Image (cartoon, rainbow, N blue to C red):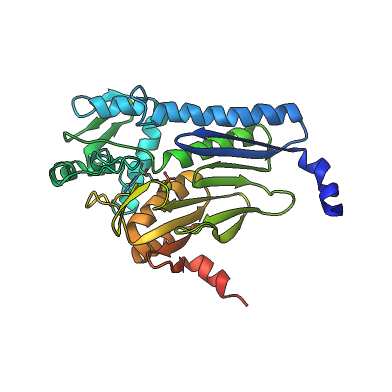
Amino acid sequence: MAALLALSPVAADWHREEAAIMGTAVAVELWTTDAAQGRALTRSVLDEMRRIDRLMSTYRPDSELSRVNMDAAGQPVRISTELLALVKRALGYSITTGSAFDITYASAGQHYDFRTGRKPDAAQLTGALPAIDYRHVVVDEAESTIRFLHPGVRIDLGGIAKGYGVDRCIALLADAGITNALVSAGGDTRVMGKRWKRPWQVGIRDPRKEGIVSMIPLEDAAISTSGDYERYFDEGEVRYHHILNPGTGDSAREVHSASIIGQTATDTDALSTSVFVLGVEAGLALINRTPDTEAIIIDNKGLLHYSDGLARVEKQP
Ligand code: ADP
Ligand code: MG
């Protein structure tokens, strides 16, 4: 009780706001002694997320990305430098992950609806597979255009846009002089500084039941978790969920969740999706050769696997 009372004046300087944006819960928490600034900044963070959603959502027919999907197979489509830069970054991940991360997954992905339990039939899948290849996507930086080299190509930034949004919001807060903050969008989180003089704590959920498998202390770092329990439907023993293997157009099933810790949320977001697709062995190999990046994977038997940097920590007495 005494501890609680001692905390309350300080707790008043923490500002927290939450809203449903990008199909998920966006949360911001920051420390400032200026209450007006605290309110203004939490609002700015949510507004920034809404702006990115309007730009990049495939659920909005009027988004810039939807316009690309409509027209880019016919002619180059002029896009903002911001969208172009993120598409370029996404294409870079296709190269470093050997195509496990591929925004053209959506050529097949568009035939899934996880709320209604719809999946592509054999003919739709056969038709979509040749369109899944990041090399079909050509960005022209000088002209600021994007073009698809193949008919039927669709792109979706769902595997990277939330992390990008989180990074943008952290930058916005840093520019305003904030040094202790957390921004999260669904499974993507980035923190600055500390929470009440201790590291921030971000939980990794149990992919099959209520509860947390592991709490990760973080300072000035990002963490993303990709799981097969976010958007899915089951048919008998087989789970269809929102992370697809670009090689097959089917859901990846070697792991139940992949969590990545790194420097920016754009990186950890793209990498968590990638490692989910790659599975334990290839996923850990990727992370072990990526500097300043660690992974915690829960495989499809519920077993935990750690990247080399974390395994060393675990083994300490
Ligand atoms: P969440 O959206 O639940 O945070 P992820 O970060 O793992 O989870 O992203 C999953 C999203 O990534 C999917 O909803 C889809 O939009 C996109 N996606 C699915 N498979 C791939 C893939 N192989 N490469 C790139 N993006 C993908
Ligand atoms: Mg991701």
Residue sitting at 49 percent across and 28 percent down? 50
- Position of the C terminus, as image quadrant, is bottom right
Relative to 304, say whether 94 is above or below.
Answer: above
Relative to 174, say whether 317 is above or below.
Answer: below
Residue sitting at 70 percent across and 48 percent down? 195
Q: Position of residue 252 (x, y in %)?
A: 31, 55
13 lies left or right of 91? right
Q: Position of residue 185 (x, y in %)?
A: 51, 41
Instruction: Please state the quadrant of the image where ligand 1 appears.
Output: top left
Residue sitting at 51 percent across and 31 percent down? 49
The answer to whether residue 175 is visible is yes
Q: Which residue occupies the foreground of this view, 91 or 102?
A: 102
Q: Residue pushed farthest bottom?
A: 317
166 lies left or right of 175? left
Q: Which residue occupies the foreground of this view, 61 or 275?
A: 61
193 lies left or right of 12? left
Q: Position of residue 316 (x, y in %)?
A: 60, 75
Q: Which residue occupies the foreground of this view, 262 or 205?
A: 205
Residue 137 sits in which quadrant? top left
Q: Which residue occupies the foreground of this view, 202 or 168?
A: 202
